[in-house]
């Protein structure tokens, strides 16, 4: 398995995973396409035999020096292989190269597997926010502080 930058031809598989995992909360296809167009190196996939097993998508607010993990998905048949953790770790490394001070993400409070991964990677936060996406669903915002020392070491 390899983790590489997402390519245009990967989008159909990514969208299929996104829809299978997130159902009605999935990003619409046109949003995934536009995120692909603006995300550059912050959109990675893991492949095995040219089949997409998972993806991670990030973004950076350069004014605030704050990065976000916008979406993470692993095909249900590929779970249990630490792919989500590997994808997130890879994305964190890429985001850190861009002199951010913090990386944030949101997660459903009942997604214990994801919360465990994020905590293992150093994310903190357990404040549950109501209606975060204006959908009457609760989310936890978790953050990872990136020290200036880490930024200098990576560059």
Image (tube, rainbow, N blue to C red):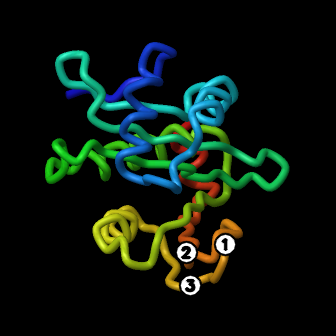
Disc on res. 132:
1
CA–CA distance in space, label 1 to label 2: 6 Å
- Residue 48: quarter of image: top left
Q: Earlier in the sequence, mark 1 or mark 2?
A: 1
Mark 3: few/some/many CA within 10 Å (<14, 14-19, 20+): some
Mark 1: few/some/many CA within 10 Å (<14, 14-19, 20+): some
In this rendered view, identify the residue nearer to me: 82 or 27: 27
Circles 3 and 2: CB atoms closer than 8 Å: yes
Residue 70 percent coordinates (x, y)? 57, 50
Q: Is mark 1 on a helix, strand or loop?
A: loop
Residue 54 percent coordinates (x, y)? 33, 38
In the displayed orientation, state which residue is furthest to the right: 63
Mark 2: few/some/many CA within 10 Å (<14, 14-19, 20+): many
Disc on res. 128:
3
In this rendered view, identify the residue nearer to me: 45 or 63: 45
Apparent side of residue 134 relative to residue 118 in the rendered image (left or right): right
Could you tell me which quadrant the N terminus lies in? top left
From what the image shows, is residue 71 above or below residue 30?
below
- Residue 35: quarter of image: top right
Apparent side of residue 82 relative to residue 5 in the rendered image (left or right): left
From what the image shows, is residue 43 above or below residue 128?
above
Circles 1 and 2: CB atoms closer than 8 Å: yes
Disc on res. 139:
2
């Amino acid at each position: 398995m390899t983790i590489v930058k997402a390519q245009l031809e990967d989008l159909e598989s990514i969208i299929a995973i996104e829809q299978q995992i997130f159902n009605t909360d999935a990003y619409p296809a046109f949003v995934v396409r536009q995120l692909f167009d603006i995300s550059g190196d912050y959109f990675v996939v893991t492949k095995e035999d040219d089949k997409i097993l998972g993806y991670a998508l990030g973004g950076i607010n350069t004014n605030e020096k704050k990065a976000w993990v916008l979406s993470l998905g692993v095909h249900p048949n590929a779970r249990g292989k630490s792919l989500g953790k590997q994808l997130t770790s890879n994305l964190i490394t890429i985001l850190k190269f861009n002199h951010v001070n913090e990386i944030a993400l949101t997660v459903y409070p009942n997604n214990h597997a994801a919360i465990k991964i994020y905590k293992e990677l150093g994310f903190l936060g357990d404040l549950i926010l109501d209606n975060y996406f204006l959908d009457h669903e609760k989310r936890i915002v978790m953050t990872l502080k990136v020290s200036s020392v880490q930024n200098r070491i990576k560059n």
